[in-house]
Image: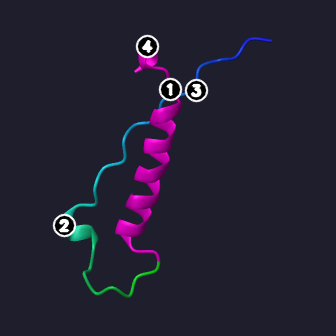
Amino acid sequence: MTLLPKKQISEPQKPKSDECCGGGSCCPCVWDTYRAAKKEWLKNQQKIPLSNK
């Protein structure tokens, strides 16, 4: 059985200034979505061997 390298995902981009209303009532807020995606991306980066980065 051959293990294939994990597919690298691209780093999530911060929301643009016009994507957040600033009201705090959106659920989920674009910033919540961004932070969750960034957390997953960082976790994925730790699993990729340095030779594949």
User: Which mark is drawn over residue 17?
Assistant: 2
Q: Which amino acid type is marked by label 4?
A: Ser
- For the residues labelled 3 and 4, the Cα–Cα distance comes to 12 Å
Residue 44 placement (x, y as % from top left): 51, 38
The image position of residue 36, as x and y in percent, is 46, 59
Q: Are marks 1 and 4 in contact (CB under 8 Å)?
A: no
Mark sitting earlier along the chain (3/2): 3
Name the residue nearer the viewer: 35 or 14: 35
Near-viewer residue (48 or 28) = 48
Asked if the stretch drawn in magenta spans residue 14, the answer is no
> Comparing marks 3 and 2, which lies closer to the viewer?
3
Q: Amino acid at mark 1?
A: Ile
Q: Report if the CB atoms under discs 3 and 4 are less than 8 Å apart.
A: no
**Residue 19, percent from left and from top:** 27, 68
* First reached walking from the N terminus: tag 4 or tag 2: 2
Q: To which residue does mark 4 refer?
A: 51
Quote the CA–CA distance across marks 3 and 1: 7 Å
The percent coordinates of residue 35 (x first, y second) are 39, 60
Q: Do callouts 4 and 2 mark residues in contact (Cβ within 8 Å)?
A: no
Mark 3 in CB contact with mark 1 (< 8 angstroms): yes
